[in-house]
Image (tube, rainbow, N blue to C red):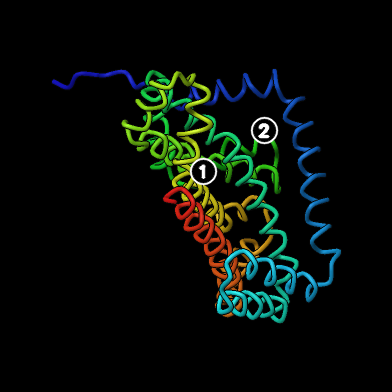
Amino acid sequence: MDIAIPRIPLGEWVEMGIDFLLVHFSGITRWISLEMNAFLAFFEGLLLAVHPLVLIIAFAAGIGFMTRKRSLTIFVFLSLGLLWNLELWPASMSTLTLVLVATTLAVGIGVPLGIGCAVYSGLHRVIMPVLDMMQTMPAFVYLIPAIPFFGLGKVSALFATMIFATPPAIRFTYLGIRQVPKELVECAEAFGSTRTQRLFKLELPIAAPTIVAGINQTIMLSLSMVVVAAMIGAKGLGGEVWRAIQRLEMGVGFEAGLGIVILAICLDRVLQNMVSRIRTRTNV
């Protein structure tokens, strides 16, 4: 005899929660969407207002100055020049805008939460299971709640990307602070430093390389979300890839995918150089 077990209406509860938020907070989300759209358009317009060659030279020179590596400078100049030659420059700047803004928001949320987890063990016990769920959840799922609140377009893609890319910033910040040698912490306490002084003058400077590595991972996750976000109108290089998939244009899809790889390599090399420099300073 089969025992009838009632089905838990989890999906219905989620929909009820989203409907409640839409009814009571739709005005706020609509305002956020308008303001964020205007900001993204302004930032992207600034990048497109400058001639591509000037911007390519500026990017290559800036990365060369930061890294002191001639080979990387040449690579950045040639690879960005390739994007310009392939007529992917506007799409690249659109993707770069989305990634930089999403990363800034993710870091602005993730680093303070990571510090809170390192300071308060209770917060760590609450946050970590949530991060496990966020990192194992398929990327497509993040698009579902974003669309009702912000509609189709870049703002929904921005917030979905931000949520998807936040966990590394939290985890690496927590890990960096927790890895500070206990001897140094005890020494600081012996000299009478407060919790705030110990955090900002000892723990965060030592944890800085790990935190920057977490920011690097946040950027990479943001770039990995670009193609998924194109499904809801994010455009950019992800939009080019999605369009190529729909039309079975393999060559166009390869070119746009190569553009995403180029942006990822450029941003990754800059962050890696920052990590090595910070480690050198802290070791000294």
Residue 211's spot in the image, x, y percent?
A: 48, 44
Residue 134: image tag: none
Quarter residue 228 falls in = bottom right
- Do tag 1 and tag 2 residues touch (Cβ < 8 Å)? no
Residue 149: image tag: 2
- Of residue 28 and residue 21, the one placed in the foreground of this image is 28
Foreground mark, 1 or 2, reads 1
Query: 163 left or right of 88?
Result: left
Query: 6 left or right of 197?
Result: left
Crowdedness of circle 1 by 10 Å Cα count: few (<14), some, many (20+)?
Answer: many
Residue 52's spot in the image, x, y percent?
A: 79, 73
Q: Residue at x 46, y 55 (%)?
A: 280
Q: Residue at x 65, y 67 (%)?
A: 65
- Of residue 264 and residue 259, the one placed in the foreground of this image is 264
Query: Which kind of residue does numbered mark 2 sit on?
Result: Phe
Residue 249's spot in the image, x, y percent?
A: 59, 76
In the image, is residue 118 above or below residue 77?
above
Return the residue at label 1: 164
- Of residue 105 and residue 274, the one placed in the foreground of this image is 274
In the image, is residue 124 above or below residue 209?
above
Q: Could one spot residue 264 in this view of the protein?
A: yes
Crowdedness of circle 2 by 10 Å Cα count: few (<14), some, many (20+)?
Answer: many
In the image, is residue 146 above or below residue 192?
below
